[in-house]
Amino acid sequence: MRRLILIGIGAGNPDYITVQAINALKQVDVVFVTDKGEETADLLRARKDVCERYMQARPYRIVEIEDAKRDRRPDAYQFAVAAWHEKRAASYERVIREQLSENDVGAFLVWGDPCLYDSTLRIIGQVAARKTVEFEWEIIPGITSIQALAARHRISLNEIGEPIHITTGRRLNDERPAVGTNVLVMLDGNCAFKTLANDDIDIFWGAYLGTPDEILFAGKLSELGERIEQARTSARSQKGWIMDTYLLRKRGSTAC
Ligand SMILES: C[S@@+](CC[C@H](N)C(=O)[O-])C[C@H]1O[C@@H](n2cnc3c(N)ncnc32)[C@H](O)[C@@H]1O
């Protein structure tokens, strides 16, 4: 039976990889990576570095899967994402059938943790449910960007006995759980924090966490909002891409 492993490789620092992930990599014959174009060449390189570092014991192949195009018009969001996942499922199914022999082990190296804002798990689940190509599959957890954020700022994500809300930049303004206590924001291309009434909110922001290009800001949102936006714009134009995440916290609360 073919086997597939979705391996979380941590979000940034190559040392974030776990012993469990390294042991899994040693069994892998084929590594599947999605090619999302120029912008993510650095992330593709990071995955290849992981292979070079931990997979020397036996031969392996890297198979690049060209990523399906996605309709990014906001009015079509749910429909567009579902259609995009469908196209990706078809191409993942094809490469699993064509590139993975019976008894081979394949791996998808997933940035951070496969269970947090990443569609690989969902797509592999769809392919498995079709039963047109049979395989067993498992997930190896990784260190997420939000754990990296908390560690680099030396903060606890939650306050004593309080919940944490994790959301996207796109939804921050609609949900407004906001501005209670602890809100973690990911996938924010537009600095959604700008729209909050921010007098009593602290922000803990990080970009390229765990990498040599890491940028950190922490303090009052009212004082830092513009600086973060400028730093983000300039870093993005220099590197061609950016990944940032942040925690919003009402000032005066106690973390533990
Ligand atoms: C598609 S999600 C993937 C999340 C990933 N699975 C994880 O466990 O962190 C991409 C988002 O994660 C966050 N992210 C991932 N890596 C990051 C990093 N090194 N520094 C800052 N934010 C990061 C950003 O919010 C980015 O928009």
Image (cartoon, rainbow, N blue to C red):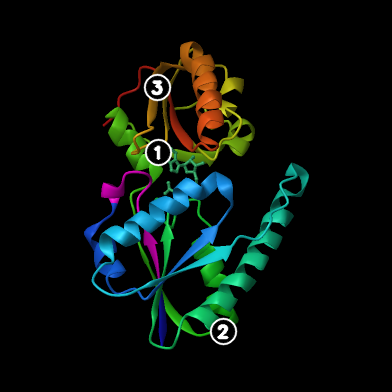
Looking at the rendered structure, which numbered label has been put on residue 131? Answer: 2
Residue at position x 32%, y 75% from top? Answer: 59
For marks 3 and 1, the one nearer the N-term is 1
Looking at the rendered structure, which numbered label has been put on residue 163? Answer: 1
CB under 8 Å between discs 1 and 2 = no
The magenta span reads: 5-16
Looking at the rendered structure, which numbered label has been put on residue 135? Answer: none
Is the CB of the residue bearing disc 1 within 8 angstroms of ligand 1?
no
With 19 as the anchor, is 201 left or right in this view?
right
Whether residue 171 is visible to the viewer of this picture, yes or no, is yes
User: At numbered mark 2, what does the secondary structure look like: helix, strand or loop?
Assistant: loop
Q: Could you tell me how far apart the alpha carbons at marks 3 and 1 are, in whole angstroms?
A: 23 Å
Residue 22 vs 39, above or below: the answer is: below
Where does the C terminus fall, quadrant-wise? top left
Mark 3 closeness class: few <14, some 14–19, many ≥20 residues within 10 Å:
some
Between 143 and 247, the one lying in front of the other is 143
Magenta-drawn stretch contains 15: yes
Which residue type does callout 3 highlight?
Phe
Magenta-drawn stretch contains 163: no
With 73 as the anchor, is 107 left or right in this view?
left
Between 243 and 32, the one lying in front of the other is 32
For marks 3 and 2, the one nearer the N-term is 2
How far across and how far down the image is residue 231, in percent?
A: 49, 22
Residue position for label 3: 217
Q: Could you tell me how far apart the alpha carbons at marks 1 and 2 are, in whole angstroms?
A: 39 Å
Which residue type does callout 2 highlight?
Lys
Residue at position x 57%, y 47% from top? Answer: 38
Where does the N terminus fall, quadrant-wise? bottom left
For marks 1 and 2, the one nearer the N-term is 2
User: At numbered mark 1, what does the secondary structure look like: helix, strand or loop?
Assistant: loop
Residue 76 vs 252, above or below: the answer is: below
